[in-house]
Image: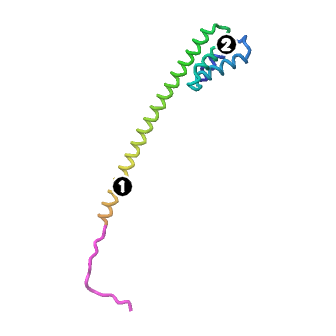
Amino acid sequence: MATIENAVRSTSGGQDPAALRDAAATAVRAALSGDPAQQAAATDKAADALAKAQNIPPDQARAQVEQYQQQYKETVAKAKEQGKQAADTTAKTVSRGALFGALALLLGALAAFSAGHASAVTPTVTSGSKRSFA
């Protein structure tokens, strides 16, 4: 979004007042990220503001706004794809860690069982001398 806004501000030239550049940038931002139901009106308003700010014909301004919209959609789609890839990688890593953790718990339980079984003392009954504690 900042790239598109900077492009609008820089192409409006240094001779136009800052208010026209700001109005054009705001109108383009509204056209790009606004409510889809009001998209057409926002696009027309952005084209008018851009035409006034840059002293260009309205058709050329509308073409620039459409170009900005296309660039914005491509950027959003690319960001969504990168986010999806990061989420997939994270999920894969976490599930692998959980699998190794469960395996370690099972091996630990098996080791504890075999160690306990091997070191268990079998009671023996001995007959013989009796102690007296007197």
Q: Disc 2 marks which amino acid? A: Ser
Q: Secondary structure at mark 2?
A: loop
Where is residue 134 drawn, in percent x and y? 38, 92
Q: Residue at x 65, y 20 (%)?
A: 27
Q: Disc 1 marks which amino acid? A: Gly
- What's the mark number on residue 87? none
Q: Which residue is mark 1?
A: 108
Q: Which residue is mark 2?
A: 12
In the rendered structure, the answer to whether residue 74 lies left or right of residue 45 reads left
Q: Residue at x 67, y 13 (%)?
A: 12
Q: Residues within 10 Å of mark 1 (few under 14, many from 20)?
A: few
Where is residue 90 drawn, in percent x and y? 45, 38
Q: Residues within 10 Å of mark 2 (few under 14, many from 20)?
A: many
Q: Earlier in the sequence, mark 2 or mark 1?
A: 2
Where is residue 128 drawn, in percent x and y? 26, 85
Region of the chain picked out in magenta, as a range: 120-134
Considering the image in quadrants, where does the N terminus appear? Answer: top right
Q: Check residue 3 for magenta coloring.
A: no
Between 52 and 71, the residue placed more toward the observer is: 52
In the rendered structure, the answer to whether residue 105 lies left or right of residue 25 reads left
Position of residue 105 relative to residue 130, above or below, is above
Position of residue 38 relative to residue 57, above or below, is below
